[in-house]
Image (cartoon, grey):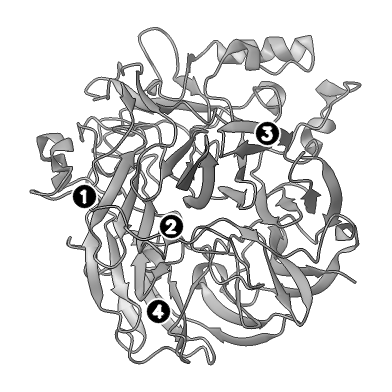
Amino acid sequence: MILLALAVVCSAHPGRLASQTGVTNGQWPHYGGDQGSTRYSTLDQIDATNVGTLEVAWRWKTENLGPRPEYRYQATPLMVDGVLYTAAGGARRAVAAIDAGTGETLWTYRWDDGARGRSAPRRNSGRGVAYWSDGDGDRRVVFITPGYFLIALDATSGRPVSTFGNNGVVDLKKGLDTEVDSVETVIGASSPPMIVGDVAVVGAALAIGLRPPSRRNVPGHVRGYDVRTGERKWVFHTIPQPGEFGHETWLDSSWAYTGNAAVWAPMAADPELGYVYLPTEAATSDFSGGHRAGDNLFSTTLVCLNATTGERVWHFQLVHHDIWDFDIPAAPILLDVNVAGRPVKAVAQVTKQSFTYVFDRVTGEPIWPIEERPVPPSDVPGEWTSPTQPFPTKPAPFDHQAFTEDLLIDFTPEVRAEAAEIARRYRWGTIFTPGSLEDATDGTQGTLRMPATTGGANWEGGAVDIETGTLYVASVSAPSLIALEHDPERSDLDYILAGSGRINGPQRLPLIKPPYGRITAIDLNTGDHRWMIPNGGTPRRIANHPALAGVDLSPTGHPSRAVMLVTKTLLFAGEGFGADPVLHAIDKATGEGIADIELPAAATGLPMTYTHEGRQYVVVPVGAFRHPAELVALTLP
């Protein structure tokens, strides 16, 4: 079966849309640069001829903004009118304003979540803040605390806006259309709100679902709030209630107690259409779904809503009845492409399973056919599986999608033999092969699957070159071990994940061949891949491993995802947390390296760029074990 169109509950926008242009004014007002999350800027002062001379303009340190230093810093600052706005401080998630030219701290705001913060599922700085202005002097920074409060600050002073909510604060544990404990219920957020017009659209993050203690959890319904007053304007039930579209996909009344299906990743929006695009996660739990039979809309679904009303415009479920932890991890990317001579307003969604799903963002119609193909059933007692899953026919996957013998590490015959011996203990599967019991009747101890449960792609997502329609996506190549166990002392679920899901190869080397991290360029006008490169060189633990002495190792790439930024002239890529402290400048057309800029520590968050007083800056969040997080601003001499 080929899916060529989707049900549309609102008519297509009748007006002509403006083209996606990325960030064109030298600022960076949204987490993804623009509301389409392109991570593209038209700035070109820094180019291939001078990028190698970049030097540090200023460094902004974060270690004193919270109760303890943070090392894996994922926030990307905004820049509006000469001021950067960001979150920092780990579990405190303080907000700060920073002078764009000097790095001087202009103000900070500290909120204490109290006892509620101790039950927060994402006790870190999150990925940043949102900005809103009425164009007439009212300028606000809007953010979500780990304990799940929505707060609006005056962008000039850093003080709460008294006319918003209760003296600047809205309690997001209220208005969820479900009963929750104001302190103990585990729900929060790690991504900033998406502001569309005067509406702040808010998602949620819940506890990691590898081994949830119960099949009962909080649903991750999405809400829209008036950015002026803090009033809730609408709620979209990601787990449909009786009488709502999709309710019938939850069999045996499982909608009544199942949770999750939240939007923890950043969102995207088309302000011309007034649409917001939601990348949802799986329902409770990640690897076991016998308690929630059915396809389970709107879990693991790209959903387009009218941002003013919260009404569904269109949707596409990327995974039916997700039992693979294939939640959508990254912001959708909006861009305009030309497919076979036809201009298309597109939305591209990269995924953990290494697919890129591409749709007309107005109608939801796939740009290229998406086929429902048969997939293996589960032999776990009581599990329910969909007989088919959607497979895009284009673009081709950007990373491996099956564990096979020819992927086993083969640097030496001895290492290859050890890897084969390890792999023989398990079943081997493709992306939609269900997990299996750790003590299966066939003697296997679980299922090896590619990509890993963390992807493929993850929150780092991708970036696009607006002018060429080229998508750059970061991914990791690694297997996961999905072994399930019955443990009634830990959970009322029939089965939960046994172990961590990680699998080591021989002598703690990887189980498979490189590259272990990669950057892939995909032409979204044609769906064809343009090039692929490893993400950096070879990790020291591999290059210096005694079992590989004398082996000539080409760059293997680090098992981390690149954090990327695209400008008119260059692709910038940091190697990610745990990798080398370098920012690569790359030729966008060929993937060839142009320059390597040394950083104080590894790039951990997505970089951004802006101009201030005639100079272009590139700002990179960095951090490492024993190196507390900081922002590093680079500019030309």
Q: Are marks 4 and 2 in contact (CB under 8 Å)?
A: no
Q: Is residue 347 visible?
A: yes
Q: Residues within 10 Å of mark 3 (few under 14, many from 20)?
A: some
How far from the left and from the top, in percent, is residue 386?
27, 24
Which residue was labeled with disc 4?
Answer: 151
Is 507 placed left or right of 117 in the picture?
A: right
**Residue 547 x %, y %:** 81, 21
Q: Disc 2 versus disc 1: distance between alpha carbons? A: 21 Å
The percent position of residue 392, horizontal first and vertical second, equals 44, 29
Quarter placement of the N terminus? top left
Please report contact status of discs 3 and 2: CB closer than 8 Å, yes or no. no
Give the residue type at disc 1.
Val
From mark 1 to mark 3, how far is it between C-alphas? 36 Å
Q: In the image, is residue 93 above or below residue 607?
A: below
Q: Which mark is residue 221?
A: none
Alpha carbon distance from label 3 to label 4: 43 Å
Q: Secondary structure at mark 1?
A: loop
